[in-house]
Image (cartoon, rainbow, N blue to C red):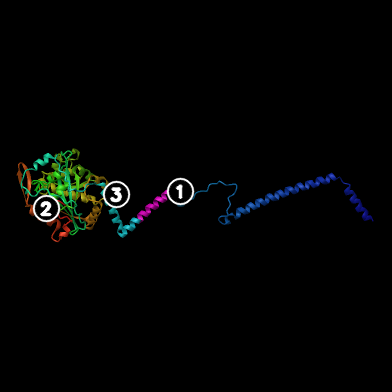
């Protein structure tokens, strides 16, 4: 009973305490509990972030998340060669790829032999559209009636032409030449236009260039301008009268009538343009005798006084000096005087130009072609250029063997004067035989000579 009374007493004491105090204590405990929960939450979030940072390198590609705190942070570019590659613009890669493809293609084509053929065809087509292309028209030969001074001196007769041999009527449709020939003859002409005004000048240089694939040689034959020959339809005159009267077509007919040779094509360069051609290739090397050097320095053959500085021995000549050298007549060259010496100089100059051109690189060759071809007048087509280049390469390319000849040959002519006009009278038959022997040799068939034309005078 006593214990019960004690409990009753205690309960009464607790109940009897102030209830306000009990509520305050409970409120304080709740506040502490909220603070503890907030602290626990903050600590949990911190631990979670730390765990995520530790595990981030192990997350597979494609699941990586960019932290919200750094959405626009720039990526640091790689360094070294890798960085350089990334910084190169895309267009450079495209251009480089195209160039690499072209180089590889050229290497493959060269290895297969197709590259050279492709370049030759391309060059031939470019050359054909660059030159002054003038095909020969034998039906309409233009007679230059304004060239009175030149024509009048050609009227002195040495050997009359029979009256029945008038200017022939050419065939209306000439047979195309056959280019499977083994020997090709190209007429090289140098026209002197000084004092001629708008009319034709004189062909002071007439050279027959022969590409001979049988003997593997190139042959240069000078036809001296004062050679007295028969001109179809006219009286006997100097050979350069044919060009003065009727241009290249009449000169073709004259060469064919007297020497029984039909040129396959012609190439004409005017002397004032010849000077530019020599300068374009960078000059030529010519050896002068003491007499030649002294003569060139004291006369106006070298038209610009500042260039009259040539010396005995080897000279690297510019265009003005080279042209002066080609025009010299009154100084002997290798013992030959007058026009004989001058025609020899023409052949020396052509050989020097060939030597210079064949040593040029592709870039310089292209530049020279673009500068010089517009100054060339010719009837050579793109297909013919391509074939002739292949012929030259077949006979040696840069190692071409060049032979020379002059018409009239030694012992086959006389100097005569008719009405104060000095001319060279030829033994036509003998010179024709010697010329055919030099160009065609003994083992050439008529098929190699014939170019498909049978009308000797009217249809070259």
Circle nearer the viewer, 3 or 1: 3
Q: Secondary structure at mark 3?
A: helix
Q: Position of residue 421 (x, y in %)?
A: 6, 42
In which quarter of the view is residue 103 placed?
bottom left
* Dominant SS in magenta: helix
Does residue 205 show up? yes
Q: Earlier in the sequence, mark 1 or mark 2?
A: 1
Looking at the rendered structure, which numbered label has been put on residue 259?
2
> Per the image, is 85 magenta?
yes
Q: Position of residue 272 (x, y in %)?
A: 20, 42
Looking at the rendered structure, which numbered label has been put on residue 6?
none
Q: Position of residue 280 (x, y in %)?
A: 24, 45
Compare residues 7 and 120 and report the one nearer the observer.
120
Q: Secondary structure at mark 1?
A: helix
- Residue at the spot 89% in from the left edge and 48% down from the top edge: 13
Residue under label 1? 87
Residue under label 3? 363
Circle nearer the viewer, 1 or 2: 2
Q: Position of residue 68 (x, y in %)?
A: 60, 48
Compare residues 233 and 38 and report the one nearer the observer.
233
- Residue at the spot 30% in from the left edge and 55% down from the top edge: 118
Magenta part of the chain: 83-104
> Per the image, is 227 magenta?
no
């Amino acid at each position: 009973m006593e214990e019960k009374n004690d409990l009753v007493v205690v309960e009464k004491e607790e109940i009897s305490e102030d209830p306000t105090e009990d509520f305050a204590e409970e409120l304080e405990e709740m506040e502490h509990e909220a603070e503890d929960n907030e602290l626990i939450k903050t600590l949990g979030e911190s631990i979670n972030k730390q765990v995520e940072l530790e595990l981030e390198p192990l997350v597979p590609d494609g699941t990586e998340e960019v932290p919200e705190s750094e959405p626009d942070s720039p990526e640091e570019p790689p360094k070294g060669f890798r960085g350089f590659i990334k910084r190169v613009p895309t267009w450079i890669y495209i251009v480089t790829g195209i160039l690499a493809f072209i180089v590889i293609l050229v290497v493959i084509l060269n290895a297969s032999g197709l590259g050279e053929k492709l370049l030759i065809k391309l060059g031939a087509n470019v050359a054909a559209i660059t030159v002054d292309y003038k095909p020969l028209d034998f039906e309409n030969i233009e007679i230059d009636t304004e060239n009175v001074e030149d024509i009048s001196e050609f009227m002195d007769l040495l050997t009359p032409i029979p009256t029945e041999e008038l200017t022939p009527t050419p065939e209306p449709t000439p047979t195309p030449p056959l280019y499977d020939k083994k020997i090709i003859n190209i007429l090289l002409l140098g026209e002197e236009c000084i004092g001629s005004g708008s009319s034709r000048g004189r062909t002071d240089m007439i050279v027959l260039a022969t590409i001979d694939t049988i003997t593997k040689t190139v042959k240069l034959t000078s036809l001296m301008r004062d050679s007295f020959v028969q001109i179809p339809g006219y009286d006997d005159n100097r050979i350069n009268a044919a060009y003065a009267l009727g241009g290249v077509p009449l000169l073709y007919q004259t060469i064919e009538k007297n020497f029984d040779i039909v040129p396959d094509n012609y190439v004409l360069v005017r002397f004032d343009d010849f000077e530019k051609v020599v300068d374009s290739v960078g000059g030529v090397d010519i050896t002068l005798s003491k007499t030649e050097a002294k003569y060139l320095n004291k006369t106006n053959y070298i038209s610009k006084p500042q260039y009259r500085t040539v010396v005995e021995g080897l000279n690297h000549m510019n265009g003005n000096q080279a042209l002066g050298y080609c025009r010299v007549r009154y100084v002997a060259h290798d013992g030959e005087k007058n026009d004989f010496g001058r025609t020899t100089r023409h052949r020396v100059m052509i050989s020097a130009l060939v030597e210079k051109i064949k040593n040029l690189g592709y870039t310089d060759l292209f530049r020279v072609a673009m500068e010089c071809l517009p100054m060339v007048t010719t009837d050579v087509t793109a297909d013919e250029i391509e074939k002739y280049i292949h012929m030259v390469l077949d006979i040696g390319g840069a190692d071409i063997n060049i032979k020379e000849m002059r018409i009239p040959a030694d012992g086959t002519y006389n100097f005569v004067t008719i009405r104060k006009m000095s001319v060279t009278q030829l033994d036509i038959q003998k010179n024709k035989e010697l010329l055919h022997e030099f160009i065609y040799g003994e083992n050439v068939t008529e098929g190699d000579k014939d170019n498909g034309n049978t009308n000797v005078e009217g249809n070259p």
